[in-house]
Image: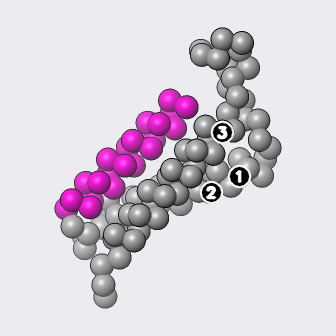
């Protein structure tokens, strides 16, 4: 069986970018200053569900590559860094 970690890593990175873009586009600050105030979702329930599904797939793909025994060490490291960076970026949005 061939190693598919490169394709899985690419799909995980792509879905991560899509979910972070949708998260950024959908959040609105309710305070006039924009920083430090409460944040609400402004695009509707369907887009929130799609964003959550893309985020879940991204996490699962990157998690799979990061702990795969068949994936090269460099690819596992990239997947772990990308996973941590996307989690951090979602917390800062």
- Residue, far left: 73
Q: Are the residues at dot 2 and dot 3 in contact (C-beta closer than 8 Å)? A: no
Residue that carries the numbered disc 2 in the rendered image: 53
Q: Label 1 crowding class (10 Å Cα cut-off): few <14, some 14-19, many 20+?
A: few
Question: What is the quadrant of residue 22 in the picture?
Answer: top right
Q: Label 2 crowding class (10 Å Cα cut-off): few <14, some 14-19, many 20+?
A: some
Foreground: disc 2 or disc 3 = 3
Q: CA distance from mark 2 to mark 3?
A: 16 Å
Distance from the alpha carbon under mark 2 to that under mark 1: 6 Å
| Residue furthest top as drawn | 33
Residue 8 shown left or right of residue 17 in the figure: left
Q: CA distance from mark 1 to mark 3?
A: 14 Å
Q: Secondary structure at mark 2?
A: helix
Q: Which residues are magenta?
A: 73-93
Residue 89 visible (yes or no)? yes
Asked if residue 25 is positioned above or below residue 56 in the image, the reply reads: above
Q: Is residue 84 left or right of residue 48?
A: left
Question: Which quadrant holds the N terminus?
Answer: bottom left
Q: Secondary structure at mark 1?
A: helix
Task: Point out residue 55 in the picture as x, y percentages from the top left corner.
Answer: 56, 52
Lower sequence index among marks 2 and 3: 3
Mark 1 or 3: the one toward you: 3
- Depth order, front residue of 38/33: 33
Q: Residue placed at 76% from the left, 35% from the top? A: 42
Measuring from the top left, give residue 52's x and y in whole percent. 63, 51
Residue under numbered circle 1:
49
Judge whether residue 61 can be spotted in this image.
Answer: no
Task: Provide the residue designation for mark 3.
Answer: 25
Query: Which of these two is toward me, 56 or 81?
Result: 81
Indicate the quadrant where residue 37 lies.
Answer: top right
């Amino acid at each position: 069986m061939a190693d598919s970690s490169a394709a899985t890593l690419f799909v995980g990175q792509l879905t991560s970018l899509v979910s972070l873009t949708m998260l950024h586009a959908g959040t609105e600050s309710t305070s006039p200053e924009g920083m430090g105030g409460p944040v609400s979702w402004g695009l509707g329930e369907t887009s929130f569900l799609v964003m959550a599904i893309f985020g879940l797939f991204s996490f699962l793909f990157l998690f799979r590559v990061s702990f795969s025994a068949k994936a090269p060490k460099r690819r596992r490291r990239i997947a772990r860094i990308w996973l941590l960076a996307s989690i951090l970026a979602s917390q800062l949005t």
